[in-house]
Image (cartoon, rainbow, N blue to C red):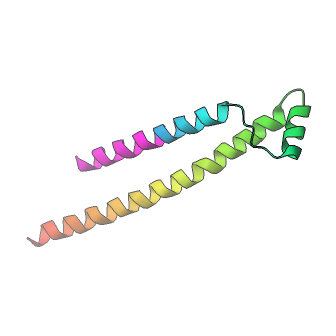
Amino acid sequence: MKYIKYITIVIVFCCAFAKADLQATTTVATTQCAMCRAVLESEEDNSTAKGINNGIKYLMVIPYILVGGVFYFIYKSKKKVTAENGADE
């Protein structure tokens, strides 16, 4: 039962971070360098801007996956130790 509880918590946090990331990327960004801004604003179809935004999202997802994997392995190791201690008693 604890397993489901921990997975639910991780999923809720991942969804919250993903939603915050999507809201942050849909607003107008004014922190681009002058060259990037000039290239992105000069195109008619904004395909380059969409590609750069997708790249930023991809780069933001990787750390969340890695941290989630670390927490998963910590959880599994603690569960294994708890099971071993329960069997010894």
Residue 9 is one of the magenta-drawn residues: yes
Identified at 80% across, 36% down, the residue is 49
Residue at the image point whose x is 39% and y is 46% from the top: 10
Of residues 58 and 89, the one nearer the viewer is 58
Residue 73 x %, y %: 39, 62
Residue stretch in magenta:
1-14
Q: Check residue 8 for magenta coloring.
A: yes
Residue 44 in the image, given as x and y percentages of width and height: 90, 27
User: Which residue is painted at 52% across and 51% down in the image?
Assistant: 64
- Residue 37 falls in which quadrant of the image? top right
For this view, does 43 lie left or right of residue 62?
right
Q: Position of residue 62 (x, y in %)?
A: 59, 53
Q: Is residue 67 left or right of residue 45?
A: left
Residue 16, horizontal then vertical, whole percent: 47, 38
User: Residue lying furthest top in this view?
Assistant: 44
Q: Dividing the picture into quarters, in which one does residue 38 lie?
A: top right
